[in-house]
């Protein structure tokens, strides 16, 4: 096992710290952008819940319920139960930010309705990703204890499944935002300048997924650097 100095002061920690800082900055940017445009009301006075209902109806989706969920920006679409859940800060709000977020979640509902291929792929690999996430570190620890290069490499491979999932998630999230903005404009739910504001909110949210990919790549690189050296010993 590595000594105190090697364990706590390994220079590869810089990669982990860099990833964590990037994630914090992206998260702060989302909150800052959402808070800014949550103070800008829609000229039509439509609430996020009403906008979501209009979008779903316009897309011919009549079997998805819209529910309120506690929390801040905990909004999501549940395809298994066909429920679109909007957070306290979004559901009844008439702000441009809230309507944009609700429309984004509707975008996921539309993806499921039309059979969008990337979201099918993402859903298909979820069991493998969950297994990999659960087993990666135990396998790596066992590999260290047993000085087994094979187990170390397997653990790194299992950790890599998380990166694969995040990469597949990128087009899903960007597509949902694109659909949302297009529908908001085409159905005149938001005016042109309001669509631009909603785009900024969704772009900030999308960057969190990009940063998550970068952060995971840095963590994976660290594992390869650390355990690659060990497997060569």
Image (cartoon, rainbow, N blue to C red):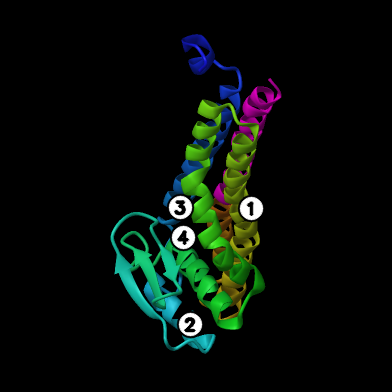
Q: In the image, is 65 to the left or to the right of 206?
A: left
Given residues 160 and 56, the one toward you in this image is 160
The residue at which mark 2 appears reads as 56
The residue at which mark 3 appears reads as 34
Q: Nearer the viewer, mark 1 or mark 3?
A: 1
Mark 1 surroundings within 10 Å by alpha-carbon count, few (fewer than 14), some (14 through 19), many (20 or more): some
Mark pair 2, 4: CA separation = 18 Å
Vertically, is 181 above or below 19?
below
Which label's residue is closer to the chain start, 2 or 3? Answer: 3
Mark pair 2, 1: CA separation = 30 Å
Mark pair 4, 3: CA separation = 6 Å
Given residues 27 and 213, the one toward you in this image is 213
The residue at which mark 4 appears reads as 97
Which label's residue is closer to the chain start, 2 or 4? Answer: 2
Residue 95 sits inside the magenta stretch = no
Contact (CB < 8 A) between labels 4 and 3? Answer: yes
Which label's residue is closer to the chain start, 4 or 3? Answer: 3
Given residues 89 and 7, the one toward you in this image is 7
Give the SS element for disc 1. helix
């Amino acid at each position: 096992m590595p000594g105190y100095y090697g364990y706590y002061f390994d220079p590869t920690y810089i990669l982990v710290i860099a990833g964590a800082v990037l994630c914090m900055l992206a998260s702060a940017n989302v909150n800052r952008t959402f808070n800014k445009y949550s103070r800008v009301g829609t000229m039509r006075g439509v609430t996020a819940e009403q906008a979501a209902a209009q979008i779903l109806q316009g897309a011919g989706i009549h079997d998805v319920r819209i529910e309120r969920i506690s929390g801040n920006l905990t909004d999501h679409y549940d395809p298994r139960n066909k429920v679109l859940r909007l957070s306290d800060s979004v559901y009844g709000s008439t702000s441009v930010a809230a309507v944009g977020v609700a429309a984004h979640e509707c975008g996921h509902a539309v993806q499921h309705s039309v059979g969008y291929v990337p979201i099918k792929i993402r859903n298909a690999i979820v069991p493998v990703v969950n297994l990999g996430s659960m087993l990666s570190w135990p396998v790596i620890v066992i590999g260290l204890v047993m000085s087994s290069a094979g187990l170390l490499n397997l653990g790194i491979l299992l950790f890599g499944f998380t990166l694969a999932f995040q990469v597949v998630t990128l087009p899903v999230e960007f597509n949902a935002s694109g659909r949302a903005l297009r529908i908001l404009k085409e159905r005149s739910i938001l005016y042109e300048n309001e669509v631009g504001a909603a785009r900024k909110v969704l772009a900030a949210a999308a960057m969190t997924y990009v940063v998550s990919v970068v952060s995971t790549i840095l963590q994976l690189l660290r594992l390869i650097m650390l355990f690659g050296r060990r497997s060569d010993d």
